[in-house]
Image (spheres, rainbow, N blue to C red):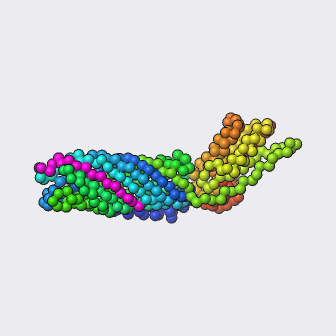
Amino acid sequence: MRGVLLGSALAVAVPSLVLPAVASAATEGFYVGAGAGVNWTRDADVRSYPAPGFGLTEDFKIGGIGDLSAGYATAMGLRAELETAWRWRNRVDDTSSATPALNGVDGKMSSIAFMGNLLYDFKFGLPITPYIGVGAGVAGVKQTLGGQSDRDWVFAYQGIVGASYDITDNLAVTLDYRYFATTDPEFDLGPASSKGEYRNHTILAGLRYSFGGPARPTPVAAPAPVPAPVQAQPQTEYQVFFDWDKSTITPTSEKIIADAADAAGRVRAVNIQVIGHTDTSGSPAYNQRLSLRRAEAVRRALIARGTPANMIRVDGVGENQLMVPTGPNVREPSNRRAQILIKVS
């Protein structure tokens, strides 16, 4: 287990050095999460029960887990979080002992843990994001045997491997495996103190909501001039701007989209093309998907304002047609946009 935890810790630290372009697409900011699942508590030896010189081995049934977490994600993919997890209903399936009277003793095991975790998200420009992590903290392990119970607070540690799936820019579904263990707890279950073990395998599914990074200034969009009644060639191109790593329509952009929808209704529009763009921060594959999401968001907004859906075509060009030329991994507000091109007969 030491080797697994050491390898996980190195894997968390190293990618931030060797994968800067991929990780820069990660959403930055605070997040909260909640989850539930199942846990398997491994067979445990209880020594000096019910008195020195005696002992038994417990075999457990499958139990449940509930989990709450809160943390902060950096743009480089690293996440630091605090977690509370309750593992319960691990009833004793059977006990075995060299002392026949201790065979088949009834009991159960549960724990509540408060952990600090360090995780790393591998951003590949896909909706699915694998992650790994390690954690350490304290756990209150409760043992019940033969009608007696006691809880001991001990050091706890865990290794985490999982993946998340982005439902929206802020909400993701998570699924992970955790190996959770503690130092040996001690229980007062009889005339003498008994020493036990607690090692656990957990499958946890949940939801994670990200609040996003610190507020960034919204780029000022070029105002759409109102065509004069006698103007022969009405405006046929509009620019809609977005926040970094977002496809959400801002209040300023809503006004521009409304102007474009109004103009398309007043002129003899043949079709409307919406082209999504990004800046160069993030991987090209991720930016291609983001540009399509931006174009689709504008299309939905145009339809909501009365523009016929069959008249609109969307395209995404990622970081390939920059309004302001930059190098790689540059957050340029003017390049985070979508063009609305109105073709008239």
Q: Quadrant of the C terminus?
A: top right
Instruction: Count up the numbered dots.
Output: 0
Horizontal relation, residue 168 to residue 251: left or right: left
Is residue 282 among what the camera can see?
yes
In the image, 270 versus 207, the foreground residue is 207
Up-down relation of residue 161 to residue 304 (above or below): below
> Which residue, as the protein is rendered here, is positioned at the far left?
100
Residue 35 position within the rendered picture, expressed as x and y whole percent measured from the top left: 42, 49
Horizontal relation, residue 16 to residue 38: left or right: right
Q: Residue at x 23, y 54 (%)?
A: 149
In the image, 103 versus 345, the foreground residue is 103
Is residue 299 among what the camera can see?
no
Q: Residue at x 62, y 49 (%)?
A: 248
Residue 141 position within the rendered picture, expressed as x and y whole percent measured from the top left: 29, 56
The span shown in magenta is: 100-116
Magenta span has 114?
yes
Residue 168 position within the rendered picture, expressed as x and y whole percent measured from the top left: 55, 47
Q: Residue at x 79, y 36 (%)?
A: 268
Q: Residue at x 23, y 59 (%)?
A: 187
In the image, 177 versus 29, the foreground residue is 29
Horizontal relation, residue 298 to residue 164: left or right: right
Residue 204 position within the rendered picture, expressed as x and y whole percent measured from the top left: 39, 49
Magenta span has 193?
no
Q: Quadrant of the N terminus?
A: bottom left
